[in-house]
Image (spheres, helix red, strand yellow):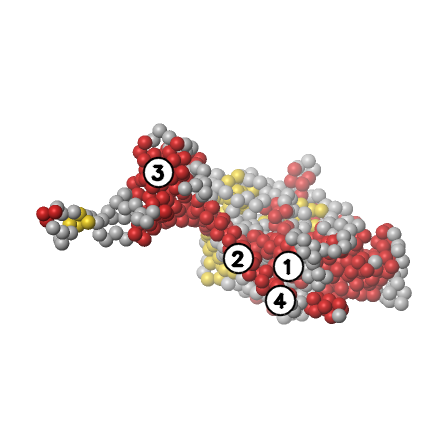
């Protein structure tokens, strides 16, 4: 039982350590304190259940009961008995917290504040993981499997964090998991009795097991590699969601770095970044249109009970002819062609390119960029918008209310009507739409009735912080609270228009902003915006922006969709939309300061995924060059060594000199002088070492126990048989080495480099192509020398660390305590 109590305590602490990555999500540490209380309750309940020898299922029930008591105490709803024992009303309170947590997750971006719903779901998750870890590690004695629920905690910040999750929390969690494994293994080893080293030496009680020490070293190295490798390999710093999310958007995806644009969830990006106060430049656009409409880049057209989401676009390369928007258009629609140049900064990374609606021709874009004529978006599966600069021609269509009223309803079997009028059954929405469009005769009148409903006169206002509802439907809550920002106005209007049987969708892009120099607009995150587009027969997609104008910088209104909050109705011309400078479009008098407080700062479209700090290709190029440089190191080392040995081997033959003191009558005898014996021996050794390395490179057996003469004879008989010049050369090298080793006077007067060259050429001629390539690129002699040096260095390090450890163990507290207990 003592071992179980110890292991249960370690399992509880390991669970808390594994939750360390959640610090990247919350602004404060309240979640950790509350989680510690919940985990302590789970661990205490487990220990109590084991103390009474309860079965495994009883231990699980006890841990769940402890977690429930902790949650009741930490998140009181005024429904528990003595603020501790839950009642049926307590579970209703917990359900309300869970529902509110979903709304908070949509409303806040990381890092999130300490709201009760978010804290509740965090504590509930960590407490549940504590139950699983205790069950696996203590109850089933499978601590390795306990890493799965612990990893689930780590996957949460990886999936939602906009940047790479810091490495320190991961190290803390890994340390807790390793502690759990070590504790379990120590308990298992102690059951065998006394411990011994590999040499049979008894290990004292205070001394760590050699096997355990080796395991700890391997664990530390493994964790270090797990942290270092993703940081070193290009492209591995993104979040887990960015790697795994695929397919059509479902309301939970992120905004990826290229790849399938179906991964984009524009609403999630908008919700998470609205409260950012820092202004970041995204786009600089220059156009010859006097008052352009919004610069758009994305569309959400799939509607489910959870709201609008994005589907994967499909299209043709922009290098081909783009569709002509003037074909089949109803008479009365005025269309003019303009030209624009867009420069995307390095702060904006997404697989979409901002353009004005209905582009007809592009420049400076490759065939990797495609155009979806239905969504009217430019996208790519291979590139992203970061740092792009391009020019395009586009058509601007303007309408009058009279022309729009002439548009007939689409037939029921029309594909656009069947696809873009699908709405989930929501009774409150259907009733409201029925009331609004009552008496409207045309499609445009129905849309205007819905559009005019989102006005200050009907109680609607702009605010970044929204209020939660109790209906369980986001659209119903917004229609009842009448407070929200651009994405809610755009989605709500599109939903209501669809409920009226008219195709509608949500568009995303940039307003015109307030930073303008001539015809050039600098657009920032404060100008990012969402609006509604409605389809009219033989006219196309017509924009309607229902968001209050005082909440949008650079707003644009038109004759067919005027400002509903203007004090006096205005009817500007179709070609001159009302601008923010128009005095007739000023904010309501009762909201003089709301423009400063509730200005839509836009959102970072890359908020759902990390932004690379540098383009991908340069990193890969550097990586390839680095690999090539590493592969060239052995060959360069072999070449350098051969060159150095060649200089040492090239010994000038000493010239004979006649002794002037000798008797001429006796005959002059040449006397060799000036021979350096030590240098001659060094030259012979260098030539022999080069020969042995050459043998290793060409995979010829080398026997270090043989004498030089025996080696030369074996080579002449086996490896060089039939080649007389190579045989003579290898015998010369053997004789030179033999004289250098054993004779008083070394061999002089012989030129050894030509002999080496002859032997090397003969061995290369007899080797296959693979052996020759290996000898040139990855010489085995160099690799063998490196392995030997590494082994020797490792042995020296181990010996030194062993000595240091031996001296430090003399002051080990465990040894001192054990010695004092023995006395």
Looking at the image, is 768 positioned above or below residue 250?
A: above
Looking at the picture, tell me which residue is in the foreground, 55 or 187.
187
Which picture quadrant has residue 332? top right
Looking at the picture, tell me which residue is in the foreground, 255 or 660.
660
For marks 4 and 2 on the same chain, the one whose residue lies earlier in the sequence: 2
Question: Looking at the image, which residue sits at the far top?
Answer: 722
Marker disc for residue 730: 3
Q: Which residue is mark 1?
A: 171
Secondary element at tag 4: helix
* Place of residue 126 in the rendered image (x, y in percent of width and height, measured from the top left): 75, 58
Distance from disc 4 to disc 1, alpha carbons, whole Å, reads 27 Å
Distance from disc 1 to disc 2, alpha carbons, whole Å, reads 30 Å
Which picture quadrant has residue 411? top right
For marks 3 and 4 on the same chain, the one whose residue lies earlier in the sequence: 3
Q: Which residue is mark 4?
A: 808
Looking at the image, is 760 positioned above or below residue 16?
A: above
Q: Which residue is mark 2?
A: 796
Q: How dense is the environment of label 2, judged by Cα within 10 Å: few (below 14), some, or many (20 and up)? A: few
* Place of residue 748 in the rendered image (x, y in percent of width and height, measured from the top left): 27, 46
> Comparing marks 4 and 1, which lies closer to the viewer?
4
For marks 3 and 2 on the same chain, the one whose residue lies earlier in the sequence: 3
């Amino acid at each position: 039982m003592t071992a179980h109590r110890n292991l249960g305590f370690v399992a509880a602490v390991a669970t808390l350590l594994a939750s360390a990555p959640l610090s990247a999500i919350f602004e404060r540490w309240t979640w950790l304190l509350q989680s510690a209380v919940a985990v302590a309750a789970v661990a205490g309940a487990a220990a109590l259940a084991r103390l009474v020898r309860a079965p495994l299922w009883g231990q699980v029930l006890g841990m769940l009961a402890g977690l429930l008591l902790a949650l009741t105490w930490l998140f009181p709803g005024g429904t528990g008995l003595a603020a501790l024992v839950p009642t049926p009303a307590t579970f209703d309170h917990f359900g309300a917290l869970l529902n509110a947590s979903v709304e908070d997750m949509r409303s806040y971006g990381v890092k999130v504040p300490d709201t009760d719903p978010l804290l509740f779901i965090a504590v509930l998750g960590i407490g549940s993981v504590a139950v699983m870890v205790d069950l696996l590690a203590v109850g089933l004695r499978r601590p390795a499997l306990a890493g799965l629920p612990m990893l689930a905690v780590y996957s949460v910040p990886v999936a939602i964090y906009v940047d790479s999750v810091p490495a320190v929390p991961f190290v803390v969690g890994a340390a807790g998991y390793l502690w759990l494994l070590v504790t379990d293994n120590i308990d298992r080893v102690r059951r065998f009795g006394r411990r011994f080293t590999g040499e049979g030496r008894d290990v004292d009680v205070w001394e760590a097991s050699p096997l355990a020490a080796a395991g700890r070293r391997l664990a530390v190295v493994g964790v270090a590699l797990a942290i270092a490798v993703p940081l070193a390999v290009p492209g591995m710093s993104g979040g887990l969601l960015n790697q795994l999310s695929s397919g059509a958007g479902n309301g939970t995806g992120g905004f990826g770095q290229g790849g399938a644009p179906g991964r984009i969830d524009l609403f999630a990006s908008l919700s998470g970044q609205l409260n950012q106060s820092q202004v970041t430049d995204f786009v600089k656009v220059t156009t010859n249109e006097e008052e352009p409409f919004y610069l758009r880049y994305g569309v959400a057209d799939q509607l489910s009970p959870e709201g609008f989401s994005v589907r994967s676009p499909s299209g043709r390369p922009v290098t081909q002819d783009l569709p002509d928007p003037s074909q089949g258009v109803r008479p009365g629609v005025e269309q003019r062609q303009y030209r624009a140049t867009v420069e995307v900064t390095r702060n904006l990374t997404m697989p979409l390119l901002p353009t004005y609606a209905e582009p007809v021709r592009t420049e400076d874009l490759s065939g990797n960029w495609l155009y979806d004529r239905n969504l009217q978006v430019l996208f790519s599966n291979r590139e992203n918008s970061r740092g792009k600069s391009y020019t395009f021609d586009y058509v601007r269509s303007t309408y009058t209310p009279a022309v729009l009223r002439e548009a007939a309803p689409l037939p029921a079997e029309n594909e656009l009507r069947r696809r873009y009028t699908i709405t989930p059954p929501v009774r409150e929405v259907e009733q409201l739409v029925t009331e609004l469009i009552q008496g409207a005769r045309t499609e445009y009148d129905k849309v205007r009735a819905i559009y005019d409903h989102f006005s200050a006169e009907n109680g609607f206002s702009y605010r970044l912080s929204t209020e939660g509802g109790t209906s369980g439907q986001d659209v119903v809550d917004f229609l009842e609270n009448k407070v929200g920002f651009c994405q809610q106005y755009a989605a709500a209007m599109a939903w209501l228009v669809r409920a009226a049987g008219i195709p509608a969708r949500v568009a995303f892009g940039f307003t015109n902003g307030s930073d303008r120099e001539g015809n050039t607009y600098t657009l920032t995150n404060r100008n990012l915006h969402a609006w509604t587009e409605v389809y009219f027969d033989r006219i196309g997609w017509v924009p309607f922006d229902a968001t209050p104008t005082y909440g949008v910088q650079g707003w644009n209104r038109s004759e067919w969709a005027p400002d509903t909050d203007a004090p006096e109705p205005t009817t500007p011309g179709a070609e001159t939309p009302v601008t923010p400078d128009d005095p007739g479009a000023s904010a309501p008098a009762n909201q003089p300061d709301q423009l400063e407080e509730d200005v839509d700062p836009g959102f970072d479209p890359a908020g759902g995924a990390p932004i690379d700090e540098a383009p991908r290709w340069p990193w890969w190029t550097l990586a390839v060059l680095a690999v090539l440089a590493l592969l060239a190191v052995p060959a360069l080392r072999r070449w350098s060594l051969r060159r150095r040995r060649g200089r040492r081997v090239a010994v000038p033959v000493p010239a004979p000199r006649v002794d002037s003191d000798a008797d001429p009558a006796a005959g002059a005898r040449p006397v060799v002088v000036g021979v350096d014996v030590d240098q001659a021996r060094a030259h012979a050794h260098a030539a022999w070492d080069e020969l042995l390395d050459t043998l290793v490179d060409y995979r010829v057996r080398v026997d270090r126990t043989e004498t030089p003469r025996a080696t030369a004879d074996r080579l002449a008989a086996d490896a060089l048989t039939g080649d007389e010049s190579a045989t003579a050369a290898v015998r010369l090298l053997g004789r030179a080495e033999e004289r250098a080793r054993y004779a008083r006077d070394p061999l002089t007067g012989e030129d050894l480099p030509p002999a080496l060259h002859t032997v090397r050429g003969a061995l290369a001629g007899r080797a296959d192509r693979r052996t020759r390539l290996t000898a040139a690129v990855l010489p085995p002699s160099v690799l063998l020398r490196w392995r030997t040096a590494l082994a020797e260095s490792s042995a020296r390090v181990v010996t030194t660390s062993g000595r240091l450890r031996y001296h430090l163990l003399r002051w080990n507290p465990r040894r001192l305590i054990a010695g004092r207990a023995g006395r």
